[in-house]
Image (cartoon, coloured by chain):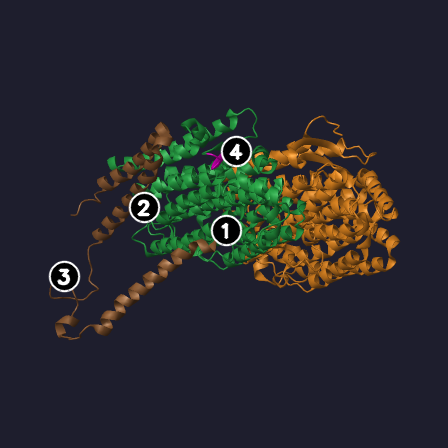
């Protein structure tokens, strides 16, 4: 029934209100003393240099993809762990097959040198 | 639950193909000789074919269905016949690729692994009896093909091809998934057998969700099998992709789409087919007509074959619309015939091409009849067969499909179909005109590598064989579809 | 029935095919030529028993062979001939060796491919005339297209590609609708009788509902009319003829065009008798237009070969007129005239080809006074011309006369109009003969010409023998076709007079 979702709606409204208040109240009450340094780009406390559109090694991208890939696969281990007792040996074999396929991929990535930085 | 309940024997061909793909992927790391991978792939394909044959013969009656993975998929005559189509396509494509990859400097081992994975996906599409399996198989197939389409990394066109294919493919998957969701919403299940039961229970009453869901499903499939007006991606993708990949996907992906669509429409939603039959008929007419008319204007042979493959999807769709046993058997027969003649035609394109394939224009085929008589003769056989001239495989494919349409009362559709065949004859003939009736512009004699020659020879054999002795294959196709209608 | 107990028809059909396969492995051109000639001549002799063992007293199919082919669909490999197809089979096996021999020096390039195509041509054409199953017929019918397409397209003249493609597409377009009509007929019969079959003899027993007959007739007739060709579907013919090599023209005129007329008799008449009768006026008028138009256009041609090509349009008009007279004289005259036209026009094309080989032109104005230079050639041209315009004592007269008698019985106006065609035919043919052969020998190039060689005489003599044979002893031919024609007509009349056939 839609009425069951009422608490969630209330929660959403409260969250929105809180966020809005948190932005609004300091803007109204807080003191403002702008300086040049305050308006400069924040970059880990350093003095900023160069433009934002800088090229960076594609290796970052590769690493990120590989991370997401294996990370997502690992997620499957969690639901499996929950029902592991019910599945018994069958579950173990199934997960073995799954991990094996994953390992083939991992081995491939490894041998291809995708894990080496240089 | 235990392992035997999964019925792994029934899914053995698919498993063999996937394992071969993984083995090929690993073997690539240890060997410098890439052709070894090709032969390894061929071995896997042959073993899978033997396994399919074994399953077909292994049961007591021939008309059977072995459910597997808790009715997520099935091994029945339909899926086994389609295995044959996919394995033939894959084997011919692998043979045609070996020297092509070397020539184009894209001889990376992943090629064969991806091709096998795609084949596995296709085979799973043929046996899927659950909408989730259909979707899963489609994604295995499509993602492998996205990569294959862009396999020639140095070539901008190949990259463009992959990107277009990926974007529109993802878009189509979206439609498909939305359709599946709506059908699930309406019936409470994604299993085809359960859907059949549900529809029996509701009687003539049909939900709006179901109607829209099936419509979205059709749109998704229309993208995948490139029906006009959902075909816009096809020519660019087919032209840009490496030719061996084009050969593979123009047949395999299309056949896989029809495989799943056939099972869905005729097995799960036969009552709903009536709602959509006119939409399908319009799609079919548009597809045939536009495919052929645009092919008329092409001077690039590869692009011409791309448009012609759109038109062929239109013919095959007629068999589905007829929705009778003759029509579906015709579809299966046509797909097998199409596998031989179309992969064969692309194999000839590979044989004629030089590195970078700057020479795919019709004029590059001028005088091929005197430069390389056997190659030209093979191309002539494929062209005549694609045009539907007897006594070749393509003719009998069309014969069965059109006769089924007449039987089901779609006489107009059959007439439009044959008229389209006439139009198509024009551009197929043009290739022959250039090969035999024009003076050669270059004297270069294309060199045929043995594996490629073998692929072309097998394709010729299939094209002529299916034409002269269609009966055994037609009987096989008729037995195969019994389960779709028997249930 | 098969009085021989032996698949003779299959042998005649597939001997050339086997010959073609063997040719693939031959290398020397001379060997290939001789091999092709031996195979085709052997095939002709093989086909002679068809005539001698043919039983005239019956309308049944003879030399029948029947093997199931695609069982589940009801397609069978069913061959057989009767008095109607007998002479067309013989004409085919007779003309092919003539055509092969006539190409001896004309074809200098790709001899192997050429001979293979000639042999394939023979297989498919005999198949067309012997097939008694609609699908088998259709397969052979379409299969004739491929070799002819190559013959025109590879060895043809200047505009060969245009002509070849036009020929192919016209014929394919015509037969496409026929295929659909075959399916419709098949399913109507299957629904009514419960026995799905493409067998012609079975389907003849099924009377098609009247409304459907019209459409089915039109679909079949379109394919046949294009092939004949009937005015206004004739435009592909002059192009194809003019561009084709000599042997191609001979086969085209001699046999391929007959396939259309044969189709009307074999399929349209027994399957859709009511529609056939209904369309008699339309078809007759188109045939008459073809006769007159073909003659007039032939007269205005400056090229000998296109003159002969247009004369074909006129002659085939006679054939169609005879068939649609719907009586015994008209029909048997039409059948005989098909053979006559195959012989005379075939011979005309041979002679034109011989002239072209010598002089490399076909323009009438380039000749004149050739009689002095080429007396032998002149004699043959004279005989063939006279045969073509229907001089009594030669074959053309018998055919045209019988057709006119038949047409006169059916409708005297048609006969009167068609008779003008004979006059026109004599006019343009004799004019051509006069301008080419008579007058002063004033072109210097013509003084160098050599008269016929022994080979060329061997090509022409058999044709001329048959021209006289038919002209003097027509009953050798009419006798064999009589009962088939009579039975066909009486069956047809019975069906028509029954009025509305069973639903």
Q: Determine which quarter of the picture holds residue C61.
A: top right
Q: In which chain is the residue bearing label 2?
A: B
Q: Determine which quarter of the picture holds residue C69.
A: top right
Work out how far the residue at label 1 is from the one at label 3, CA to CA, in angstroms: 49 Å
- Residue B103's label in the rendered image is 2
Nearer to us of marks 1 and 2 is: 1
Question: Residue drawn 30% across and 34% down?
Answer: A100
Nearer to us of marks 2 and 4 is: 4
Chain coloured orange: C
Answer with left or right where residue B339 lies relative to residue B405: left
Drawing shade for chain B: green
Which element is circle 3 on? loop
Label whose residue precedes the other's in the sequence (1 or 4): 4
In the rendered view of the protein, which quadrant contains the C terminus of chain C? top right
Work out how far the residue at label 1 is from the one at label 2, CA to CA, in angstroms: 48 Å
Res C274 visible: yes
Q: Residues within 10 Å of mark 2 (few under 14, many from 20)?
A: some
Q: Is residue B28 above or below residue B295?
A: above
Q: Residues within 10 Å of mark 1 (few under 14, many from 20)?
A: many
Residue B472 is situated, as x and y percent measured from the top left of the image, at: 57, 32
User: Which residue matches tag 4?
Assistant: B76
Q: Is residue C411 above or below residue B408?
A: below
- Residue B182's label in the rendered image is 1
Q: In which chain is the residue bearing label 3?
A: A
Residue A38 is situated, as x and y percent measured from the top left of the image, at: 15, 71
- For residue B74: magenta? yes
Answer with left or right where residue B418 lies relative to residue B65: right
- Residue A44's label in the rendered image is 3
Magenta range is B70-77
Work out how far the residue at label 4 is from the one at label 3, CA to CA, in angstroms: 64 Å
């Amino acid at each position: 029934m839609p009425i069951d979702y009422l608490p969630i709606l209330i929660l959403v409204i409260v969250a929105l209100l809180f966020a809005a208040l948190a932005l609004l109240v300091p803007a109204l009450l807080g003191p403002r003393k702008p300086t040049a340094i305050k308006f400069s780009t924040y970059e880990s406390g350093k003095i900023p240099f160069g433009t934002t559109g800088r090229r960076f090694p594609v290796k970052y991208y590769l690493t990120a993809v590989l991370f997401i890939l294996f990370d997502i696969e690992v997620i499957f281990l969690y639901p499996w762990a929950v029902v592991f007792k019910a599945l018994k040996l069958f579950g173990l074999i199934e997960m073995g097959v799954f991990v094996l396929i994953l390992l083939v991929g991992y081995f491939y990535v490894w041998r291809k040198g995708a894990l080496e930085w240089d | 639950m235990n392992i035997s309940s999964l019925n792994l024997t029934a899914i053995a061909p698919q498993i063999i193909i996937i394992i071969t793909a993984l083995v090929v992927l690993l073997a690539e790391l240890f060997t410098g000789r890439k052709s070894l991978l090709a032969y390894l792939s061929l071995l896997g394909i042959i073993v899978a074919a033997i396994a399919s044959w074994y399953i077909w013969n292994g049961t007591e009656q021939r008309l059977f269905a072995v459910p597997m993975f808790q009715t997520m998929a099935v091994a029945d005559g339909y899926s086994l016949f389609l295995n044959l189509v996919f394995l033939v396509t894959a084997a011919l494509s692998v043979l045609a690729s070996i020297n092509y990859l070397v020539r184009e400097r894209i001889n990376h081992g992943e090629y064969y692994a991806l091709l096998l994975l795609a084949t596995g996906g296709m085979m799973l599409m043929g046996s899927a009896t659950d909408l989730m399996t259909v979707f899963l198989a489609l994604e295995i197939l499509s993602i492998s093909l996205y990569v294959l389409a862009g396999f020639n990394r140095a070539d901008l066109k190949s990259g463009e091809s992959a990107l277009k294919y990926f974007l529109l493919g993802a878009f189509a998957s979206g439609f498909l998934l939305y359709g599946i969701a709506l059908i699930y919403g309406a019936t409470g299940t994604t299993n085809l057998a359960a859907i059949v039961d549900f529809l029996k229970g509701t009687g003539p009453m049909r939900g709006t969700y179901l109607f829209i869901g099936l419509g979205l499903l059709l749109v998704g499939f229309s993208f995948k099998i490139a029906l006009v007006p959902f075909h816009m991606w096809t020519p660019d993708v087919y032209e840009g992709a490496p030719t061996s990949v084009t050969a593979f996907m123009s047949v395999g992906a299309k056949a896989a789409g029809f495989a799943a669509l056939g099972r869905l429409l005729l097995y799960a939603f036969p009552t709903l087919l009536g709602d959509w039959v006119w939409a399908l008929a319009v799609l079919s007419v548009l597809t045939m007509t536009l495919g052929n008319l645009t092919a008329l204007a092409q001077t690039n042979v590869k692009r011409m074959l791309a448009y012609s493959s759109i038109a062929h999807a239109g013919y095959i769709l007629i068999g589905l619309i007829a929705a009778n046993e003759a029509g579906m058997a015709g579809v299966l027969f046509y797909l097998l015939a199409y596998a031989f003649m179309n992969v064969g035609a692309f194999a000839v394109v590979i044989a004629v091409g030089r590195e970078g394939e700057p020479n795919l224009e019709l004029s590059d085929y001028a005088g091929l009849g005197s430069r390389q008589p056997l190659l030209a003769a093979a191309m002539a056989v494929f062209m005549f067969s694609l045009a539907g001239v007897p006594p070749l495989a393509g003719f009998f494919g069309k014969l069965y499909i059109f006769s089924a349409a007449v039987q089901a009362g779609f006489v107009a559709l059959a007439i439009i179909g044959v008229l389209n065949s006439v139009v198509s004859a024009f551009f197929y003939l043009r290739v022959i005109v250039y090969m035999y009736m024009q003076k050669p512009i270059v004297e270069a004699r294309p060199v045929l590598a043995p594996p490629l020659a073998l692929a072309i020879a097998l394709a010729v054999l299939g094209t002529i064989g299916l034409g002269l002795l269609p009966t055994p294959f037609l009987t096989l196709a008729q037995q195969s579809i019994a389960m779709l209608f028997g249930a | 029935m098969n009085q021989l107990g032996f698949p003779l028809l299959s042998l005649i059909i597939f001997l050339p095919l086997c010959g073609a396969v063997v040719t693939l492995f031959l290398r020397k051109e001379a060997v290939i030529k001789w091999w092709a000639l031996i195979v085709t001549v052997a095939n002709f002799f093989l086909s002679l028993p068809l005539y001698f063992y043919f039983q005239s007293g019956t309308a049944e199919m003879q030399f029948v062979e029947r093997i199931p082919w695609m069982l589940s669909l009801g397609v069978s490999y069913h061959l057989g001939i009767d008095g109607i197809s007998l002479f067309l089979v013989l004409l085919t096996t007779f003309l092919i060796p003539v055509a092969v021999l006539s190409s001896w020096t004309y074809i200098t390039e790709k001899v192997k491919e050429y001979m293979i195509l000639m042999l394939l041509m023979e297989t498919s054409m005999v198949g067309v005339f012997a097939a008694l199953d609609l699908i088998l017929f259709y397969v052979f019918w379409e299969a004739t297209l491929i070799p002819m397409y190559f013959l025109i397209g590879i060895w043809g003249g200047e505009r060969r590609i245009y002509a070849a493609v036009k020929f192919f597409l016209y014929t394919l377009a015509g037969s496409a609708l026929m295929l659909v009509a075959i399916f419709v007929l098949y399913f109507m019969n299957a629904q009514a009788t419960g026995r799905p079959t493409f067998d012609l003899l079975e389907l003849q027993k099924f009377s098609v509902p009247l409304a459907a007959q019209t459409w089915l007739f039109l679909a079949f007739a379109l394919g046949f009319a294009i092939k004949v060709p009937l005015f206004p579907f004739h435009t592909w013919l002059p192009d194809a003829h003019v561009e084709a090599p000599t042997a191609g023209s001979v086969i085209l005129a001699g046999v391929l065009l007959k396939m259309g007329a044969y189709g009307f008799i074999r399929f349209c008449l027994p399957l859709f008798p009511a529609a056939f009768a209904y369309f008699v006026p339309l078809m007759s008028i188109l045939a008459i237009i073809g006769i007159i138009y073909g003659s007039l256009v032939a007269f205005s041609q400056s090229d000998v070969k296109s003159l002969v090509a247009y004369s074909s349009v006129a002659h085939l008009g006679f054939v169609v007129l005879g068939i649609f007279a719907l009586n015994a004289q008209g029909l048997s005259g039409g059948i005989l005239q098909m053979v006559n036209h195959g012989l005379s026009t075939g011979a005309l094309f041979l002679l034109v080809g011989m002239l072209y080989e010598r002089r490399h032109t076909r323009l009438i104005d380039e000749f004149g006074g050739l009689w002095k230079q080429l007396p032998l050639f002149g004699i043959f041209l004279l005989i063939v011309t006279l045969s073509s315009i229907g001089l009594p004592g030669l074959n053309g007269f018998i055919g045209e006369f019988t057709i006119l008698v038949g047409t006169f019985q059916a409708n005297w106006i048609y006969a009167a109009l068609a008779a003008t065609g004979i006059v026109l035919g004599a006019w343009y043919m004799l004019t051509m003969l006069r301008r080419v052969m008579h007058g002063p020998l004033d072109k210097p190039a013509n003084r160098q010409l050599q008269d016929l060689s022994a080979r060329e005489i061997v090509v022409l003599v058999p044709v001329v023998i048959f021209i006289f044979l038919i002209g003097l002893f027509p009953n050798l031919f009419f006798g064999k076709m009589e009962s088939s024609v009579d039975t066909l007509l009486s069956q047809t009349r019975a069906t028509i007079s029954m009025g509305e056939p069973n639903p």
